[in-house]
Amino acid sequence: MAHFFAPDGNQDNFDDIGRFAPDSVSQAKVKVGTSFDVALWGGKGLYVSAEPMYKPDAPPGGENVVYGLSLQELPPIGEIRKFRCDCQRTGTFRIQTYTRAIFGSESVRLEVIVGDGSMTRPQFTRFLALRGQWIAYRASVTPVTDQFDKLRQDLYQVRNAGTGTNPAIGAWPTYLIDPDDGMMASIEHYFLCRAWVGNGVYNASQMRAQTQLYDWGKQHGLTPRHNPNKPTTPLTELQLYAQEHGIQDGEADLKASGQPAPGWKTPPTY
């Protein structure tokens, strides 16, 4: 089966290793302003496209440049195709392969997460573990759309513990709380995005637009506080990752529920 892999054997930039083959890679995490090489095995005859991760359904056009990311095919080594990916803007992208240029079926892909370098591997691992522990904590809540809405509410109470009717932080199991408030903000962002998209509160495109506006406000000191006694956390690469993947997982939850995605709705107020 076709798969991407590290051409020099160095997998430091890559995650999600071994899904399609022992040396396969399905995700790259790189710093903005840098480039990396990736190889494609079994890709002879496939069309390769650089795309934003949230590209709407449309016939592929074989484009190799999107805003913030460009893809250059290098000379092959035998049957192995090589590509150089230049990353000029933060965001989540993908290198997607298709069986043919127009109306082709999707084949293997590589997700490319471009950040500012602030998301370390231990931090990312901690996020995944903590997210899993919260999901297990509310595993009895069904269906999953209700479960993630409950988790959204839980994390809002944790982030605003002791204010209004929110219980004190000591009311929550200690293994669910990280001393880094930025980590807890990332967990909250994930569940908020997943719950709102998965329950059809907002469609994925609107949710992305809202998070981008919220993030822009954070960067410029304009986003208002939910808790007047607590400043907003600085915007981090981990928070951007959490938002995007919460939206993606919410899309999958909505599709599994059989509900249609809503149209544009009035944005939330703060």
Image: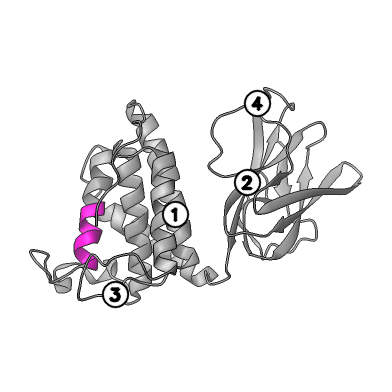
Residue 206 percent location from the top left of the image: 40, 42
Label 1, secondary structure: give it. Answer: helix
| Residue matched to label 1 | 212
Label 4, secondary structure: give it. Answer: loop
Horizontal side, residue 88 vs residue 44: left or right: left
Q: CA distance from mark 2 to mark 4?
A: 16 Å
Upstream in the sequence, badge 3 or badge 4? 4
Tell me the kind of residue under disc 3. Pro
Residue contact at pointers 1 and 3, CB within 8 angstroms: no
Upstream in the sequence, badge 1 or badge 3? 1
Q: CA distance from mark 1 to mark 4?
A: 30 Å
| Residue matched to label 4 | 105
* 90 vs 21, nearest the viewer: 90
| Residue matched to label 2 | 94
Tell me the kind of residue under disc 4. Ser
Q: Main secondary structure of the magenta part?
A: helix
